[in-house]
Image (spheres, rainbow, N blue to C red):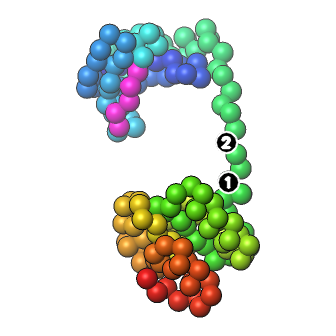
Amino acid sequence: MFLTYKNRLNEVKAYAVDVVAENDDYLDVFDKDAERVKTFKKSNILSKENSFEGASIKAKILQKDYQIIERKRQPSRDNWKNQEGKFEVCFTGFPKAEKNELIQYANDNGLFIRKSVTKGLGLLVCGKTAGWKKLETANKLDIPRVIGTDGFYNFLETGEYAE
């Protein structure tokens, strides 16, 4: 099936799709170009065409009827970069108040705080409800871990990864 569709930003585009499921308001499709499932609002499907080329031509014609809404700029990723090369640490599985204290203590000791496990991470600090995905990623990347606040404070004092 070949569709022209108007997205939430009023961009009119052509799609080559296979229908996966539908209800009164939505159509779940497999987008052949993006190779993934997408959900379309039926009310935003502007036309069904016989070919992708036909849908592309129709999209260009119909776009003139809709003013594209400017995308909001994403915040600069510079604040996510460890530009000073500080030691990186990530906390998982702690109650919010305890995690905030750990983050403050880490900041006070010159560490860079990550929210996710990345290859540059130096230490994963695990609380009682540590996220399995973070643990799995840390294992794959061979990132050292410590357990609990005591393990973290011991690391800061001694530099050891004792669990």
Q: Which residues are magenta?
A: 36-40
| Image side of residue 11 versus residue 143, left or right | right
The disc labelled 2 sits on which kind of residue? Gln
Indicate whether residue 151 is drawn in magenta: no
The residue to which callout 1 is attached is 77
The residue located at (53%, 89%) in the rendering is: 160
Q: Is residue 51 visible?
A: no
Can you say whether 120 is above or below 36 in the image? Answer: below
| Image side of residue 114 versus residue 78, left or right | left
| Image side of residue 112 versus residue 40, left or right | right
Question: Mark 1: which secondary structure?
Answer: helix
- Is there CB contact under 8 Å for labels 1 and 2? yes
Can you say whether 17 is above or below 47 in the image? Answer: below
Instruction: State the image coordinates of residue 38 (x, y, percent, origin top left).
Output: 38, 30
The residue to which callout 2 is attached is 74
The residue located at (46%, 13%) in the rendering is: 44
